[in-house]
Image (cartoon, rainbow, N blue to C red):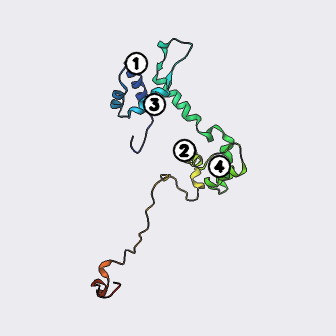
Amino acid sequence: MGAIYTQLSMQERRRIEDWWHAKVPVAEMARALKRHKSTIFREIKRNFWADEAFPKKYAGYFGMAAHQRTQRRRSTQRKLIRFPELCQRIVGHLKDGWTPEQIGNRMIYDGVKQRVCQETIYRHIYSKEGMAQELWWYLPLHRKNRTPRRARKRQKSKFDRDVSILFRPDDVAHRRQFGH
């Protein structure tokens, strides 16, 4: 899968549909699309269409329907888009100088029925809608681009770089006394 995962495109879904109707093996589909075979299996299983009212010959995988279902599924998961009043309350707190961590934890403390975690707030800030409102400006560090969540920070050196073992005194270098 690699470091970055991209969603299946409409063209890939149509190719999967054609191959599925032609009974091409999933491993062959995955090789041609340069995807993992579990991605193809999951796509077919998740977007397989069957209706009890229709005969089984009409059931199957359809690329256009699969793409629409995926788009609908992805859009409904964005909580701050679905609930604009919750979004306005969060944006108001951001403008008052609160951090996303403070907003999320305060919602838990107050026992608010509709609440979001800090990661949801960060995702909204750096989404297309949040960038249009320039919400990143209200964060403490004012970063326009988000740094990776689990990026390692460079550790400070444990030894001073100005002091080298090559510049030690001669009596220490030759170890003439006990303790050198």
The amino acid on which the numbered mark 3 sits, given as a three-letter code, is: Arg
Q: Disc 3 or disc 1, which is closer to the eye? A: 3
Labels 1 and 2 touching (C-beta < 8 A): no
Q: Residue 107: where, in percent of width, then height? A: 68, 49
Q: Nearer the viewer, residue 30 or 18?
A: 30
Helix, strand or loop status at disc 4: helix
Tell me the distance, in whole angstroms, between the alpha carbons under discs 4 and 3: 37 Å
Q: Disc 4 or disc 3, which is closer to the eye? A: 3
Sooner in the amino-acid sequence: mark 4 or mark 3: 3
Labels 4 and 3 touching (C-beta < 8 A): no
Q: Disc 1 or disc 4, which is closer to the eye? A: 1
Tell me the distance, in whole angstroms, between the alpha carbons under discs 1 and 4: 48 Å
Helix, strand or loop status at disc 3: helix
Q: What residue is at 45 percent from the left and 60 percent from the top?
A: 153
Determine which residue is flagged by label 2: 127
Sooner in the amino-acid sequence: mark 4 or mark 2: 4
Q: Residue 1: where, in percent of width, then height? A: 39, 40
Sooner in the amino-acid sequence: mark 1 or mark 2: 1
Q: What residue is at 72 percent from the left and 48 percent from the top?
A: 111
Determine which residue is flagged by label 1: 21
The amino acid on which the numbered mark 4 sits, given as a three-letter code, is: Val
The amino acid on which the numbered mark 1 sits, given as a three-letter code, is: His
Tell me the distance, in whole angstroms, between the alpha carbons under discs 3 and 1: 17 Å
Quadrant, the C terminus: bottom left
Tell me the distance, in whole angstroms, between the alpha carbons under discs 3 and 2: 27 Å
Sooner in the amino-acid sequence: mark 1 or mark 4: 1
Determine which residue is flagged by label 3: 42
Determine which residue is flagged by label 4: 91
Q: Residue 175: where, in percent of width, then height? A: 29, 84
The quadrant in which residue 157 appears is bottom left
Q: Disc 1 or disc 2, which is closer to the eye? A: 1
Q: What residue is at 36 percent from the left and 78 percent from the top?
A: 163
